[in-house]
Image: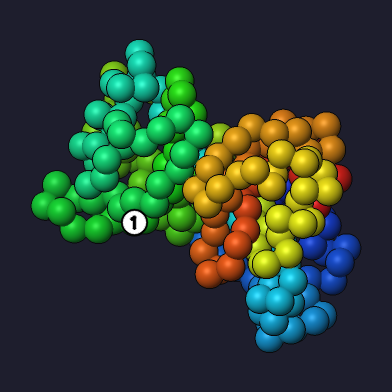
Amino acid sequence: MAQALKRTPLYELHCELGAKLTEFAGYEMPVQYSLGILGEHQHTRTKAGLFDVSHMGQITLRGSSYQETALALEKAIPMDVLGLKVGRQRYGFLTTDGGGILDDLMFSNREDHIFVVLNAACKDSDIVHLRTLLEPEISIEVIENRALIALQGPASETVLSEFNSQISAMKFMDIETLSIAGAECWISRSGYTGEDGFEISIPSSAAEAIT
């Protein structure tokens, strides 16, 4: 029997808005809307587009201090984690003992812990790898109760600033905890589209209302 596909907290909204759905990384995900892929691409390049990336992995790493957690994570990624300032995010690679690349990821200094975002297709094996390397000294929490969306495009700052004026002060690769429509959101100024943008972790219960 085929395993049932997982759904993100925004699944019902995708259906309501007429999204064409497909399987990706074990999830039933939207691949396009009525505007079409080219139209969505152009809209994101010239204005702003909103992407549901809730299928990606969100985890936190916690040791007795940020220093301990950072030095532990440096065993798994060839990056300067210890030197990363509070409220800053960095792109990195998860590697094998021999230096081969397992996956890429984003990690951020949240002062008392490290927040990591993993790719959807590799997140389960990535977490196993990190647990093997870091536990029990470092506690790894897999976040299951938050959606993740990406607002990307040259108009993204203008759009998001309507909900919180502090957005405009954020620089590329900053990460902050800010309120959006009354919900505590973890917002980074980052993305993979080549345009300005923000990646926003939202409590699942508030995800549909905010988007």
Location of residue 197 in the rendering, given as x and y in whole percent from the top left corner: 62, 58
User: Residue 145: in sight, yes or no?
Assistant: no
Displayed quadrant of residue 170: top right
Which amino acid, by three-letter code, is at mark 1? Asp
Q: Residue at x 68, y 86 (%)?
A: 38
Q: How is the image coloured?
A: rainbow
Near mark 1 (Cα within 10 A), the count class, few <14, some 14-19 or many ≥20, is some
Q: Residue at x 14, y 47 (%)?
A: 97
- Name the one closer to the observer, 206 or 42: 42
User: Residue 119: in sight, yes or no?
Assistant: yes
Instruction: Please tell me whether residue 12 is drawn above or below residue 70 in the rendered image.
Output: below
Location of residue 39 in the rendering, given as x and y in whole percent from the top left corner: 74, 84
Displayed quadrant of residue 80: top left
Q: Secondary structure at mark 1?
A: strand
Left or right, 110 with reference to 100: right
Kindly identify which residue carries mark 1: 103
- Residue furthest top as drawn: 64
Instruction: Please tell me whether residue 40 is drawn above or below residue 138 in the rendered image.
Output: below
Q: Residue at x 55, y 40 (%)?
A: 175
- Residue furthest left as drawn: 98
- Labels in figure, total: 1
Instruction: Please tell me whether residue 30 is drawn above or below residue 160 in the rendered image.
Output: below
Q: Residue at x 68, y 67 (%)?
A: 154
- Name the one closer to the observer, 98 or 196: 196
Instruction: Please tell me whether residue 138 is drawn above or below residue 83 in the rendered image.
Output: above
Location of residue 91 in the rendering, given as x and y in whole percent from the top left corner: 39, 51
In what quadrant of the picture does the N terminus appear?
A: bottom right
